[in-house]
């Protein structure tokens, strides 16, 4: 590997599910390539080309295994089991190997009459042809990230056959704190909820969706809209819960204070926006179907709705199901919401392994930046040829 010791690299996994196109990105340092000769060869090839590919098959294991059936009485699940969701192997005791095994398996079905569960023991990507590549990264790499982590999580964003049953069973929209949201957000929080490098990654993500002069709605906005510096002529409207937070946001040209959990109707005419962004907030909606239908209404044909989040939120106000799902499954939930609302050309993207800023107050807790999870879709014009 001839690149400098400070060079950050991006391992990229690209694949398709029946619902969407997916890109999963992991930033690593050059030393991570030493774990496997295939990665070392790919790193050496970067001296001659901008991108090089790697065979990802060995890491998408197991594959080709038959479904398993287990008796509910043979193990003691620590959480309520829901068909369609993923669980670590250790959730089933020693029946699937080591009691410390975190590899995911999908729970396909629960038969209450026979007290048996059916599991798919294969890797979530075992049946999905994927392209694995290596390139240089514009983001700094956190120390200690291993390349095997690229294959830990991806695949779980593929929605189950019955998303409603898997993601939204009874109680899914309940919250720890059911008191008025207006009271919870009455005092302004003029602070950042994502670390600086994650905020840069969110802005970079939005930059790929935005064009000069676009009309943008920052839905569930705050004191920052996580938009790129350019283009500078965006017309940005912000809808949020706190007037003082919205007033402190310099990118907003219009501001609306509204609780979408009380009134999900957006106060704009049909086709008012070219793009709607929602950052680190989707988990607080208790009426997401109604709100996202409204998002589609206020978008012009061809407009984009972009949802991004990390692994930090206010637990008391997030919907119950959010904490039950693996972070990659939350992407599946979000994509299902977009699909049900009629959005097309669905895509998801993740970014992990970025170094946390050295001046970040949470650096002692974890040295990696808040991971980025994003899903977006386009309002398809039904009259387009």
Image (cartoon, grey):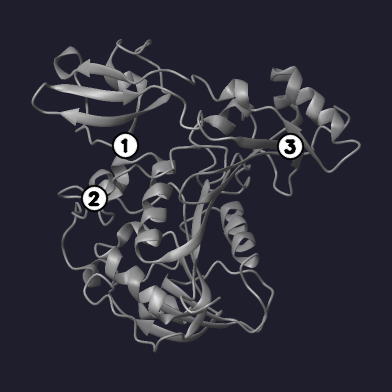
Of labels 1 and 2, earlier in sequence is 1
Residue 191 or residue 101, whichever sits in front? 101
Above or below: residue 258 compared with residue 181: below
State yes or no: discs 3 and 1 in contact (Cβ < 8 Å): no
- How many numbered discs? 3
Image location (x, y in percent) of residue 111: 15, 28
Question: Split into 4 quadrants, where in the image is the C terminus?
Answer: bottom right
For the view shown, which residue lies furthest in the right direction? 48
Characterize the local packing of mark 1: few (<14), some (14-19) or many (20 or more) Cα atoms within 10 angstroms: many
Residue pictured at 53% horizontal, 35% vertical: 128
Which residue is under mark 3?
Answer: 134
Q: Is mark 1 on a helix, strand or loop?
A: loop
Question: Is residue 40 visible in the rendered structure shown here?
Answer: yes
In the rendered view, tell whether residue 95 sits above or below residue 299: above
Q: Is mark 2 on a helix, strand or loop?
A: loop
Tell me how far mark 3 sits from mark 2, CA to CA. Answer: 37 Å
Q: Residue at x 60, y 44 (%)?
A: 356
Q: Which of 177 and 89 is in front in this view?
A: 89
- Packing grade of label 3 (10 A; few <14, some 14-19, many >=20) is many
* Residue 259 falls left or right of residue 252: left
> How far apart in space, not on screen, are marks 1 and 2 (Cα)?
11 Å
Mark 1 and mark 2 residues within 8 Å of each other at the beta carbon: no
Front-most of 107 and 78?
107
Q: Where is residue 146 in the image (x, y as percent from the top left)?
A: 62, 27
Can residue 191 be spotted in the picture?
no
Lower sequence index among marks 3 and 1: 1
Q: Is residue 108 left or right of residue 334?
A: left
Residue assigned mark 1: 85
Q: Name the residue under label 2.
A: 168
On screen, residue 250 above or below 122:
below
Q: Is mark 3 on a helix, strand or loop?
A: strand
């Amino acid at each position: 590997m001839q690149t400098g010791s400070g060079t950050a690299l991006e391992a990229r996994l690209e694949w398709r599910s029946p619902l969407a196109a997916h890109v999963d990105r992991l930033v690593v340092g050059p030393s991570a390539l030493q774990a496997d000769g295939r990665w070392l060869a790919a790193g050496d090839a970067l001296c001659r080309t901008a991108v090089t590919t790697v065979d990802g098959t060995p890491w998408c294991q197991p594959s080709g295994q038959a479904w398993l059936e287990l008796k509910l009485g043979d193990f003691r699940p620590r959480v309520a089991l829901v068909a369609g969701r993923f669980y670590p192997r250790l959730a089933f005791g020693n029946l699937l190997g080591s009691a410390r095994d975190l590899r995911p398996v999908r729970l396909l079905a629960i038969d209450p009459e026979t007290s048996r569960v059916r599991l798919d023991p294969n890797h979530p990507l075992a049946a999905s042809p994927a392209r694995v590549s290596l390139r240089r990264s514009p983001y700094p790499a956190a120390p200690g990230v291993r390349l095997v982590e690229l294959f830990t999580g991806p695949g779980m964003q593929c929605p189950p056959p019955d998303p409603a049953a898997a993601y939204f069973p009874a109680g899914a929209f309940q919250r720890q704190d059911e008191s008025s949201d207006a009271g919870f957000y009455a005092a302004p929080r003029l602070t950042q909820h994502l670390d600086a490098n994650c905020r840069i990654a969110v802005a970079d993500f939005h930059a790929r969706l935005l064009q000069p002069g676009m009309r943008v709605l920052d839905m569930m906005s705050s004191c920052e809209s996580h938009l790129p510096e350019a283009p500078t002529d965006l017309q940005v409207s912000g809808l949020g819960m706190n007037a003082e937070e919205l007033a402190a946001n310099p990118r907003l040209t219009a501001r609306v204070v509204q609780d979408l959990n009380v009134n999900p109707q957006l106060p704009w005419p049909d086709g008012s926006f070219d793009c709607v962004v929602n950052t680190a907030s989707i988990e607080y909606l208790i009426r997401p179907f109604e709100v996202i239908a409204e998002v589609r209404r206020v978008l012009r044909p061809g407009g984009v709705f972009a949802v991004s989040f990390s692994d930090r939120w206010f637990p008391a106000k997030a919907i119950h199901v959010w904490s039950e799902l693996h972070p990659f499954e939350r992407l599946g939930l979000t994509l299902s919401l977009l699909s049900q609302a009629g959005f097309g050309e669905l895509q998801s993207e993740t970014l992990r392994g970025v170094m946390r800023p050295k001046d970040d107050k949470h650096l002692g807790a974890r040295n990696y930046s808040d991971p980025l999870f994003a899903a977006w879709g386009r309002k398809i014009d039904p009259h387009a040829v």
